[in-house]
Image (tube, rainbow, N blue to C red):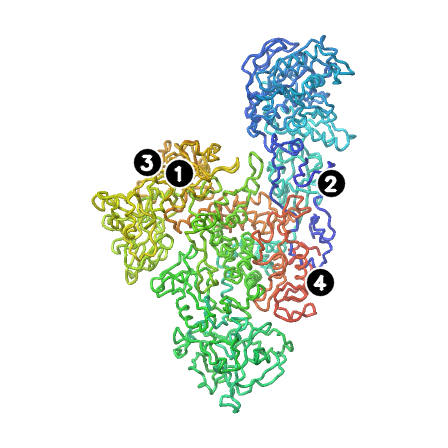
Amino acid sequence: MQLSSYLLPKKKAQKPTLKPYFQKDQALTKRRVKATSSSWLSSFRRISTIAIMALAGTFVFVNIFHGPMPTNSTWRRRLCVSGSLTSMLSLRTSRFLTSCEIDTVLNGGSFDSVFGEPAPSPYVPGSYGNYTVANTTNTTYVADETQNITLPGGEDNVAFVVTVPSCPEDATVNSSNTDPGDNFYDAAAVLKNSVCNCTSENPDSGSNYSNTMYAVIHPDAIECLAPVSGDTTGGAPEEGRRLQVAPSRDYYDRIAVLEELGYYVIIYKEPVSEGDAFTKIHNTKDLMSLYAYNLTNHPVSVMVNFDTVFTSPIDDIVVELTSNTTTKKAKFSRSKDGKVNPGIVFLKPDSEEFNKVLDIVKNIPYDETTGWNGTGVTGNDLESLLTFHFDQDTEAYEDSTEALADSVVNFGSNKDCGEPWDCKFEEEWDAVTQQECTELNQVWYRQRKSFEGRWSKNERVDTTQSSYHADAFMGYCAENGEYQRASDFSVGKQYAFPASGETILLSDYNSKLNSLSLPMTKGAGQLGILSLQTETKTIPVARSYDAQTWEASSGFLASRLTPPTCDDVSGLCTFATNGLPPPEVGESYAFSYYEHDGFGDAADAARFLEQTTFGGSLADITSLVNTGLDYGAWLTEQMSSSIMTSHREYYRRRLNKESEYSSHHFNPGPFNACDPNSQWRAYALSERDGIASHQSDVSKYLSIREMNGPGTGAPYLWLVEGMVRTVTNDMPKLIDGPSGFVIQDLELEPVYYEIEFGVGNSYKWNCIGCPVRVLTHNADGSHGLKAYVANPKVDLTNFEALASYSIVNLPSTGLSSINNGDEFRSNPIGGAENWFAQFNAAGEEFVMTQQITDACQDHPITASAAFTHLSQLNSTENPGVNADRHVKSAFPPIFGKVLNTLTQQEDYFLYSPKLYVPENTPENPLPDGGKMLRDLSAGASVDTEFAVTKCSNVPRNFLNEQYCRLANTEACSSTNSGEDGLGVVVCGSIGEVSNSGEESFGGRINAFDSVADSTNQFNRNMGTLNDPYISYKNTIWANIALSGQDQLRQRMAWALYQLIPIGADLTTADAQMAKYVEGWTQYYDIFVRNAFGNFKDILKQIAYNPAMARWLSFIDNKSLQYDLDNGGPGTYPDENFAREIMQLFSIGIYQLSTNGAIELDSQTNAPRMTYDTNDLMSFARVWTGFTTNEPRGNAHGNEETSVDPLSINPEYHDVFPKSNLEGGYLGDGYPLCADLPDRVHFRKGAIYRLLGSRSSPELQKEGSITTNAPLSLVLDSTSSPLYTQLCQADSQGVCTFPGYVTLGQNLDYSAVASTLPEYANVESFRIVQVQSSPIPIYYEYVRPPCVETHFFNNGKKAIAGINKKADAICANPTLPSVASPACCRTDIAADTTILGSQCVYYGERLSYQETVNRCSNAATSSAVCVDAQSISWETPYAAQDCSAPEDVTQKSSYSWTATDCQTKVKLSFPETESEVPQVSRVDYFDASITTGYSNSSSLVSSDSINFYKVHWMGATTSAPTTELACNNIPTCGSVVDGCICDVNIIDSALYYSSVAQIVSVESLLSSVFLGAVDADVYDAGVYTSLGNCGLDGVLDDVHVLSASSANCASLDVNTIFTVTDQFGVEHRRKNVQSTVEVISTSLAFRNPVHHISMLDRDERDIHYEVDALLEHIFYYKSHAPFLALRMIQRFGISNPSPGFIERVATAYKIGTHANFGSGEYGDLEALLASILLDPESRSVTLDADPSHGQIREPMLKLTGYIRSMDGRNKIPTNWAKLYKMDIGQDSYGTESVFSFFLPEYEPAGVIGDAGLVSPEAGVLSGSYISNLLEGLLALSKFGMTNCGKGIVSYYAYNGCSNKEGDYTKSEGQLEFVPSNMADIDTMLDEFSLQLTAGRLES
């Protein structure tokens, strides 16, 4: 099989034809590039010039691509594994097998040590011809048929026997045992090597048998003539294999050769006399092979020839022959002519069988015609003899031709091919024969290559022992059959550059070469490419460019290429043959060369902006060129934290303020018309008057009344809901829209007109005279007249008394005009647009910039919090009002006036209450938690369809907890059910800014709608998902992408979003989420915020994000045990997120090297997986308990908040240990809770969180009380060191009570240790009270992360709460603060009640030993209660729960008893042979197995099915697999689904007894798993530093500490190692391991550790466990290269080279690149800088490499086109129409978690054939391409419309212009104008620059 067959099916072999790396393409040529574009672009030849220009910039670097290594069986690349000859022929040896390594020879030794020790017995001296046996080593023996020789052997040792009957120059000899002649050395070595590879000398072979090699040599064959020096006749290399014994004669010393190769040599004559056999056997010397029968010290003897090659172990054959039940005596293979092939015969050595064969020779008649004994077996040779012998007894001798062919290749089976060393190749052969013979020869040469590959040619022979030439068998077989000698190529093959743009085939480079040398490029613009070419495809291999050394290209061959050795002096890079796979038949390497002189600075700048922005304009390009292409400076500016556009903030700042009613999210405000930023208008009617399609299906009513009574005429009052808005002297007119045609006068009351602002495509315009649509209703409720009325000016001149309330005097200096940008757009009526031109001016809306001093108390909107929304109309008294469409409440108008200094007249205004979105950020949370806003909206709802605004206080979480603070006024709690008042802690939310700025002053057109409809949804007109509101998130994305200044940050965010998307499914899977713009934008902001931060922060924030939890379905994910306990069927936790956070977001499915290469299993050569099913199930259990928070005000979310991080429901969470991806546990590396020092809450690192006046903890399981019971420990304000830390008094001595306190050092209690209760009387606490008045203030102590061992000895039973005896659990008595004390009298009867409280405060938890101490001091004859005192548990609850009064709303956890218990292990029964048992814990309390489990908690009951993966310490083959096997173990008992066994826990075994045993940091961390507490936390002197223990310069990152008298040479269990790993992370490990031994078995496993206590399921510890999982994934070895590859692919290069991936991954690991990065692992700034500044990104030369670059993704094509062509939108929100464009991509439009396209997508054709990828090609469907091209063309012709197949999906204008370039009906257009419209070349140059970065040919 060909090398290329990894990519394509095998084809008939043909000689390769010259195929240039580039195909000439006349339609697309590159200007100033001597190489032309890659051939795959030819499919675009028919695209018109205009379309290409529109598409320009649509591609970055148009070329071919990279993919992951194939996973099929062809990757199993070791010899001796293949199951058939065919598959074996497809392999290349990837490494020389260990059994055949020749370390001794490499060090100058001899070959003896390579292939076995010399035989211990001496040789038999003698003289045979001119050869004296006494001169040989002790591995040569003399034998004849009567002589027995003691030789090596053994029941597991197989003999392999080859014969040397004669010299090749003896013409009289015609031996069937082919002699290799001058290739003797080669043949003997290759045979030996193949045997070595396939027996136990090679551990990787899997064979159970060793070998001994025998050479049976005839005395006549010892001395064979060789050519004299310089004579090459006979085929031997010059100065070839000769040993000069005497000056008069040269001859081959074959015995010396064989001995040196490790053969045992038997000097042996033919076993019968010539006289007896001459007429029957042509060459009796062949009978020497029968000596194999005499090797009876071996179980099997294998008869072989020198041209035999073994390809896989022969164990099956040996086992079959040696089986006690077999009758087989031999197995053989036949040649093509049907004869037995003596080169492959397996015999059971037997002297009787030997004699039987000789008897045939001596006594059986033979006839040339009838054959032996008339059987027809003809041929007087060994083959015929053996054929006749074996065919006589078919039961004893088995013909296994096909079976043996799987393991052995013998060239005698196809004599047409000759011997491999002869390199026979006949041109007249047919193609099949040529192919077959070539492949057979390759088998032999491949074996020789594997041998030579590890044998240094200059040191292969000890020259003091032998004078063999150093290059003894460095010869290879050429394609034409000619033998190539070592002298022909000993320095390898060297090539020079071809001409630029040319490709040469390296047809003379193949398996005969030992090296290939190529020149390095010498300057910028030069590119050399090495590729592998076949008949149909081109596969990239390596390249050199811009004077850089040769490196591996991306693609299939990259991982197989060994880096070359480069010499700067010679300018050559040399690839060793074993590092550059030789081509096979039909393949050839090709060497291409290109020169590229670049496109200039402007083009380079344009290319850089293509990668780093959403498109660069000419101004952007010019600006970058003016910096001298200082990319570093540009990156520094863009990476500045001050440049950041938050998508959520963008939305909130632009929220439309035109809202009148409160929702539970927001409410109108400012509530005082006199406050700063209040808004005022000069026109009478506002947008909120037309509520339809905005807030509900109801509107307000307009009526006209004669002020002085009916029939009096002017003046006319304009009333809305019966309240005056203005007065006019002219009768109002109804007009017919834009035409201005007057229909009629408005009718007077009692006619009422419904105001219909915002219906359909008509828009309300906030200006004087703007058209306001009104309609009447018929008697049946249907619409009557529809027309328009001009919006009147507010004017109360001379009529102020008409106002219902006093008029506010406005300061003239405080009003600032708002230019809101509102402008006319045509409406459905059509007509003359100029009619509205007068209304385009600004100056009719104002904002008051200062506080109004005029009294406002007379206005109901400001008079009290519970004002009433008044309406003066109702459908009964006002029959023209439609009851169903009538607003039932309305704000009364508030008027203001100011003196106009120009006219000296009063100007009147109306106050416009606006939607108030206050700031509530972490740094500046609402001081009252939104209480005022909630209270002010309390009276707003006259109808239940309008919700009341909720509190805005944000639940405390990891994003805001550092900023939370104590409210200085009455405040809302963070939950709607919490208590309000003083002492509330207030927190904010990231991005929760106000809309009080000028961005939101523009009214509806320039802002986003956000008011509640009749169903309390936060939207407008949300009937379908196509409504504009749904696209607001897309609007925001488009506006920022097209106009944002932080282009690099936004591009990085877009790349990260594609890696970790949420998408379109949420619009259907969760209708609420579809409508929550803030939920979407808050998610996207994770990537914006952390674009240059740390990826670990991204992982955590997406894991806690509500949108992600809904997207990947782990909201309210519940543990298996919770489901069972609550009557469920036993549903396992959802695995969706657990899978995708690994597979798609962080590490992938294959283990990767730093350069991105897939790591292969050393046994199977299959890719190594990162996780398996058990890992997935384990991690799924981590993602249980996550739930959303309750809805709150000031943010989106109806039934839940869509913006705040998820919270944890501990009852849902799985508490059991979880395995990790490295065979350990998620708790590995964390200290044991039992090792925490006493009073750790007073020590360095202790964390306290402010609770305010809340009396119960937030992160820990505890009850709350409503009386003054001793709930918590009260600190002494006068002497407590802790009080000082928590109070943090200001300069006035007043406590500031910070929200988050971390102790920087151990607190000194030495002066008050015996007097302060907090130190003297308690072991631990969860809550401390710092202040009791004027309000109580509490803090929660947050214990640092620690873990517990799951199994332990000497447990004590703990019982949960009152009447909960059945809920018992075995507790570890060594743990601190586990359960409450329960003390009983011991001097009275067993039913005595429990003694009173022994707790200092309610809920106190103690260790078991402290419980014993408390009970012994409680009263006379008292002790810890035992389980037998059951009646005692019925006593009042207060007794056992530490004085908690009856108003305790939640009892505390467990109480100690003195009853012993034990933890047992339950082993699962494996379902398959390969399955490893999993375990669960079972707690046992009583003596009887039938009752011992009956009262245990369901977590640890005998029927528990909570099995989990453990780290077994050895083999598990002895584990019971059935109930019977279980019950046969004396310490085990079976249940239905497992085997429950006793265990013993050993906690003291240490890993290292001496520092000298530590090999490396990695080995220490992978063998010592238990973490240790920071030694600084302990009291001084507890730990002593042993320093580096003399490991300086070796292990500088290891520091040793000891708490005993241990020293560096004698470590113990009290030793701590402080280690800094390769990522700069510090670890502390304790020199201890905890092992669980299953008693009465050989089974043992490492004791699982876990964060979560089974007695107290605290939210705190769940967060720690989640952090442990995220960090485990984050630091997993595959993560850095995985992320490096994904990010490189998103920034311009689909197929990065391995070197590029490694450089980026390294920058990510060390956290720096150039001057970028924080120096911490996971730094994205460093990663991105390394991508963008790397030569592989910046080199223009690589344009000529077809494997470089990528297709630009559709959204970048679109945005790049708009930005480069200076796209401008008339109205900011209208870029939102970049939504649902059907081009293959859409912001927020991912259809699945796999994002828009797969990173490993391999398109069919050239790219896929090359083993490369093109992710973006996954969306290159015909319709997508067509839609994009037509959209771009329409954008150029008609602007931002849906005309001409434009890309706008939602469009407010009506009608299309038929004239190209007429943008009057567009919402935006492209404004780029070439600098010289008269010069076509200049125009094309500018288009080429901006659209293709200079790539387009003019």
Amino acid of disc 4: Asp
> What is the x, y in percent for residue 772?
56, 78
Which numbered disc, 3 or 4, marks the residue closer to the eye? 3
Calculate the distance from the C-alpha at mark 1 to the C-alpha at mark 4. Answer: 89 Å
The residue wearing badge 3 is 1604
| Residue 701 horizontal side relative to residue 436, left or right | left
Which numbered disc, 1 or 2, marks the residue closer to the eye? 1
Calculate the distance from the C-alpha at mark 1 to the C-alpha at mark 3. Answer: 33 Å
> What is the x, y in percent for residue 1799?
59, 49
Calculate the distance from the C-alpha at mark 1 to the C-alpha at mark 2. Answer: 72 Å
Residue 1464 disc label: 1
The residue wearing badge 4 is 1879
Amino acid of disc 3: Ser
Indicate the quadrant containing the N terminus: top left, top right, bottom left or bottom right: top right
Which numbered disc, 1 or 4, marks the residue closer to the eye? 1
Amino acid of disc 2: Leu
Q: What element does badge 2 sit on?
A: loop
The tag earlier along the polypeptide, 1 or 4, is: 1
Q: Are marks 1 and 4 in contact (CB under 8 Å)?
A: no
Amino acid of disc 1: Lys
The residue wearing badge 2 is 18
1469 in relation to 916, above or below: above
Calculate the distance from the C-alpha at mark 2 to the C-alpha at mark 4. Answer: 43 Å
The tag earlier along the polypeptide, 2 or 4, is: 2
Residue sitting nearer the eye, 1846 or 1324: 1324
| Residue 842 horizontal side relative to residue 505, left or right | left
Residue 1410 seen in the figure: no
The tag earlier along the polypeptide, 3 or 4, is: 3
